Amino acid sequence: MTMEARGWRGLAIASAFALAGFALLVSLGVWQLQRLAWKEDLIAKIDARAHGAPVPLPSPAQWPSLKPDDYEYRHVTVSGQFEHDKEALVFRASGPGDGLSKPGYLVMTPLRLDDGSHVLIGRGFVPEDSRDPATRAAGQITGAVTVTGLMRAPEPRNAFTPADDPAKNEWFTRDPAAIAAHFSLERTAAFSVDADATPVPGGLPRGGVTVVTIPNDHLSYAFTWFGLAATLVAIFGLVVFRRVRAP
């Protein structure tokens, strides 16, 4: 085989690899566009849930079959009695602003329903100097209450999440199952409810602190894959041009 034949054979092999790479990059770009459509639909659904009129909380019989995608940020209303002696404090690096832009806690309090089941209510934010319930006794509402808020899925942990310290009532994720187990709560929902910004005696906890954040970077990812595909075409085209022009 002559050197020229070998050169053309090498170019043919390189062309096959380039074509496969181009097809892969384009398919990844198309996949991201499909994900973009899915994400935009999800964001629209969540926006409608969060800002829609509140609906009754699903009954305890429905809880086991509920999936986060079905209920996350659904605006609901639920009635019961708070069990303040079992409140859990979930650390937050910063509050909602308006004088509370400092470290503190999300106060999660079990709400006992008429049938004895429980739902953890994220009542809102308190600064570190108000972690002791005695400093905000006016806000420890007793008797029957009706809470309106957003259903929330359990908060995931990662490698950087500190370990919870139940003995000190120090938690680092919104995890109803772990909190329920520590306080021996029976029939507790796997989800929680973040209370709306309704007036609370004494002003604490400060409700309405839920941040609805749904990342949507799929369009930029699609441009990245398509851009890489275009770059591959340009570079390979230059290689072929130089090969053809070579004496």
Image: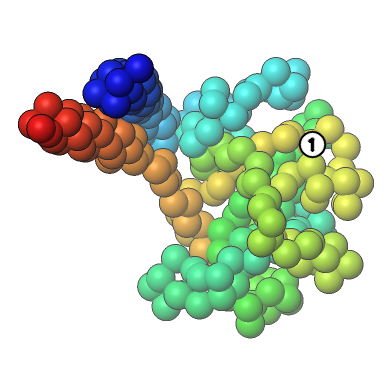
- Mark 1 lies on residue: 188
Crowding at mark 1 (Cα within 10 Å: few <14, some 14-19, many 20+): many
| Identity of the residue drawn at 75% across and 18% down | 61
Q: Quadrant of residue 8?
A: top left
In the displayed structure, would residue 10 be above or below residue 175?
above
| Identity of the residue drawn at 50% across and 77% down | 102
Tell which of 66 and 242 is nearer to you: 242
- Residue 48 position in % (x across, y down): 36, 29
Q: Quadrant of the N terminus?
A: top left
Q: Quadrant of residue 58?
A: top right
In the image: residue 207, left or right of residue 4 = right
Q: Amino acid at mark 1?
A: Thr
In the displayed structure, would residue 77 be above or below residue 30?
below
Circle 1 — which element? strand
Q: Residue furthest bottom?
A: 129
- Residue 28 position in % (x across, y down): 37, 26
Residue 140 visible in this rendered orientation of the protein: no
Q: Quadrant of residue 247?
A: top left
Tell which of 55 and 20 is nearer to you: 20
- Residue 26 position in % (x across, y down): 30, 23
Say how the picture is coloured.
rainbow
In the image: residue 12, left or right of residue 201 = left
Residue 72 visible in this rendered orientation of the protein: yes
In the displayed structure, would residue 99 be above or below residue 121?
below
